[in-house]
Image: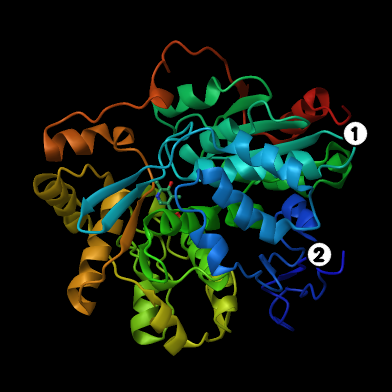
Amino acid sequence: MENRIRYYSTNRNLEGIDGIIPFKGYVSFRDALLQGQAPDEGLYVPETVPSLLYEDIFSLKGKPYVEAAMLVAGAFLGGEIEEKLLKIIIEDSYPFPVPLENVYDRKYVMRLDQGPTASFKDFAARMMARLMSYFRPRGKRLNVLVATSGDTGSAVGEAFKGVEGIDVNILYPAEEVSGRQKKQLDTIGENVQALSVKGKFDDCQNLVKEAFSDSSLEYLNFTSANSINFGRILPQMVYYVYAYSQLCEKGEEIVICVPSGNFGNALGCDYARRMGLPVKRLIMPTNENDEFPGFLKSGQYEKVSPSRACLSNAMNVGHPSNLARFFELYGGTVDRTGRVHRSPDLDEMRRRIFSVSISDAMTKNCIRKAYDTYGLILEPHGAVGWRGLEIYLEREGDFPLCVSLETAHPAKFPDEIIELLNIAPDVPESMRGLEARKGEPIELTGDYGEFREYLEDTLQTEE
Ligand SMILES: *Cc1c(COP(=O)(O)O)cnc(C)c1O
């Protein structure tokens, strides 16, 4: 009991800043998971980071992914959940492979695209869903509401599909999703219902926000599965430990490269290093949304607003939500508007992190060149990563063991791949058979009263 890790809010020191009443308390992992966000709208961070023994990391060599997940998650959740049950959760979360593709020498691409929606977000969302199911109040059903402009919604929906005691409603803007995305969202099935809203993404988000703050709906046990939930960060520490253990020679360091948008994925790597993973440098390339590389260079943080629309569209972020956690880890504070209240230790940050902005032209070039040179097939996000790693190696000299992440499957970007490489990427199992899937959305006008009525009439609260 005493050695359970406590979580606090990144806003706890923001005394007297417009409208924020800092939350100065601590919560358990369970509360951080079920609340999603701190009451002061800060992000929950662990008070201490557990250490792994190097021997334990090294002994994962040749072992399956779930063993790495047990080691990392077990360190964070010791005392919170029985080992046997954690194992069931983890095995159920990761029934797919995690390929490490050799590119040249000891340079690798780790493909995190073998899950049900062919994006790395499956890793976090699937484990979070199962942890929420485990930690939900006894006898109660939880109701997840999520607004999506496309891909996040299907990752969350697929992750919760069939998970006990939780129902999911996904709101999407009728006019703004592609035909393919609509089909994906409408046909998930089981405990996951799509709601097609007449309007824009903002309208969907507003409906969700209004429902969350409607005290007369409190009895519906709402929870959000958004990307700032610490329950999504924890699973994102695992694959770094896994990759290292599979590839390392005893005692050596590794360079890891993570194409970044909201910085949750890269944050997992920083935590893994703090747990004891020998990470020489964390490379965090961004697309043309260059607020972070700019900050590392100048020490002045300026968010990009509005964010720039790039090919790697899941990284079009002008002010990364997890920057607050990064600043906190390096002794600084930034709020969600992008205002810096205390600068982090820049020297330390620069020692640990390298960041560079990759333009769309560079991204395309990289997709072409990686294929021509190595036969490596990358989609735009992975190409931002790979080019970022190349630039790092050009500037700082070669480093033996490097892993760059591919965060989505190339088949999700057929137009770009065909245009640039003249080949059609293989379509993975998970993306096949979409046409044959059945399911209809519920159509909403965007009026809150109507939405509220739908929620009251259909959602269940007891098992
Ligand atoms: C979300 C996403 C990213 C960015 O990850 P962050 O954790 O937000 O930095 C990169 N690539 C793909 C394909 C994504 O979906």
Residue 56, quarter of the rendered image: bottom right
Q: Position of residue 180 (x, y in %)?
A: 40, 25
Q: For mark 1, what is the residue? A: 139
Q: Around disc 1, counting alpha carbons within 10 Å, would you say few (fewer than 14), some (14 to 19), or many (20 or more)?
A: few
Of the 4 image quadrants, the one containing the C terminus is top right
Q: Residues within 10 Å of mark 2 (few under 14, many from 20)?
A: some
In-image side of 454 versus 253 (left or right)? right
Q: Does mark 1's beta carbon lie closer than 8 Å to ligand 1?
A: no
Horizontal and vertical percent for residue 442?
63, 21
Dot 1: element: loop
Residue 360 percent coordinates (x, y): 22, 55
Q: Nearer the viewer, residue 8 or 337?
A: 8
The label number, if any, that marks residue 448 in the structure image: none
| Rendered position, 90 above or below 40 | above
Q: Residue at x 45, y 81 (%)?
A: 349
- Residue at left offset 44%, top offset 29%: 181
Residue 4's place in the image compared with 166, above or below, is below
Q: Is residue 60 visible?
A: yes
Tell me: residue 94, above or below residue 162.
below
In-image side of 210 versus 55 (left or right): right
Residue at the image point whose x is 80% and y is 76% from the top: 24
Residue 342 occupies quadrant: bottom right
Residue at (54% x, 19% y) in the render: 187
Q: Amino acid at mark 1?
A: Gly
Q: Position of residue 252 (x, y in %)?
A: 38, 71
How far apart are the alpha carbons under marks 2 and 1? 22 Å
Q: Quadrant of residue 204?
A: top right
Front residue of 42/17: it is 42
Q: Which residue is mark 2?
A: 27
Element type at mark 2? loop
Q: How is the image coloured?
A: rainbow
Q: Between residues 99 and 235, which one lies in front from this camera angle? A: 99
